[in-house]
Image (cartoon, rainbow, N blue to C red):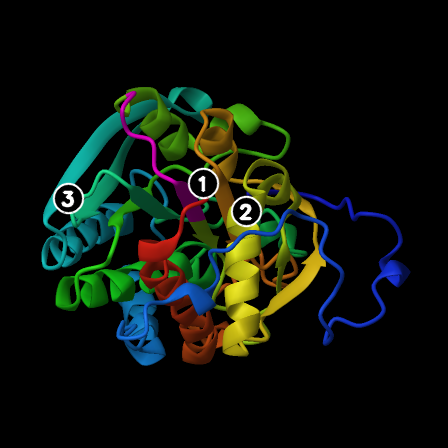
Amino acid sequence: MIKYFLFLGAIGVFSSCSQRQEKTIPQQDTTAQNLPRKMTVPDFDGQKAFSNLQAQTDFGPRNPNSIGHQKCLDYLFVELSRYAEKVTKQNFSHRGYGGENLTLTNIFGTFNSRASDRILLLAHWDTRPRADQEKDPSKQNRPILGANDGASGVGVLLEIARLLKQDAPPIGVDLLFVDGEDYGKSQDLDSYFLGSRYFMKVKSENYRPRFAVLLDMVGYKDLQIPMEQNSMKFAPQAVELIWSTAEDLGVTQFVNIPGEEISDDHVPLNAGGIPTVDIIDFQYPYWHTTQDTPDKCSAESLEAIGKVLMHVLYAQSTATAK
């Protein structure tokens, strides 16, 4: 992902992050309070999600065309196939730097396939081939392990998949693991978000989920998730739903203030008409460095994200707004 450090006005406008801030986006009725009385939301297990994170990092860096990339692809396909009704691969290629031909694959899993009304959850599973944010120039061409930047979002989605298998969701849910998100060099946006661009290119015109949620860098021990600005612009109702659900649940990792504008996998989806929210920790200090390792992440952070998303999904049976 690419960061743009653009805040809405002076930060002093917001008196306290610990208090409910004034809304800047439309209200809607689809909060956790709309859950049917007898509906039970499955408990999200942060330890299992963390194990999913570690399983990916055990393969080493997963940058395209690497051994770790191929091993992780096989792992993710097998794991998702254990839970989803149907799992497909989207194989594609991209001409990289120096004429390198990248072999890339998206993985798409479907739950409650008979439901026409659907929600899409996605995360990128590849890792960056260069640690360009390292202060030591000798390390800047090394691939990163990507414990947070890659493995964390996928780890949460795999645990959600396990729970959806056990208790069918009240709405159709699709999980998408996109490849080639983090290949590009600085300022070369055409070489980022390769998997999400390809997904939007080949998807059926009839595939129109109610909204989508992107998870990126959601595992840091000191997790802070403000409202990303492209998300507020293109998917304001979904932003309101997610952050108000977090507040109702007492999940304090979601901070109810506008954050930065980020270019990420949600940009191609929003441009293609799928309202998409990016849940992302903008301020992860080990971003694009060789220090992005599992010890920087925690099961508690992953559980905070997963808990909120599970309540969002299971609240959808009474939701009417899109």
Q: Secondary structure at mark 2?
A: helix
Q: Name the residue: 18% across, 46% down.
A: 110
Give the residues in magenta.
205-213
Magenta-drawn stretch contains 211:
yes
Which of marks 2 and 1 precedes in the sequence?
2
Task: Give residue 54's position: percent from left, percent from top.
Answer: 32, 70
Q: Name the residue: 80% across, 47% down.
A: 8
Which of marks 1 and 3 precedes in the sequence?
3
270 relative to 104 in the view: left or right: right
133 relative to 238 in the view: left or right: right
Which of marks 2 and 3 precedes in the sequence?
3
Residue position for label 2: 237
Which residue type does callout 3 highlight? Ser
17 relative to 71 in the view: left or right: right
Task: Reply above or below: 148 against 199.
Answer: below
Residue position for label 1: 322
Residues under labels 3 and 1: Cα distance? 19 Å
Instruction: Report crowding for label 2: few under 14, some 14 to 19, many 20 or more residues within 10 A (C-alpha).
Output: many
Task: Reply above or below: 128 against 92.
Answer: below
In front of the other: 105 or 170: 170
The mark found on residue 113 in the picture is 3
Mostly what secondary structure, the magenta segment?
loop
> Which quarter of the image is occupied by the C terminus?
top left
Task: Give residue 50's position: percent from left, percent from top.
Answer: 34, 73
Q: Nearer the viewer, mark 3 or mark 2?
A: 2
* Image marks 1 and 2: residues in contact by CB distance under 8 Å: yes
Q: Residue 161: name its quadrant.
A: bottom left
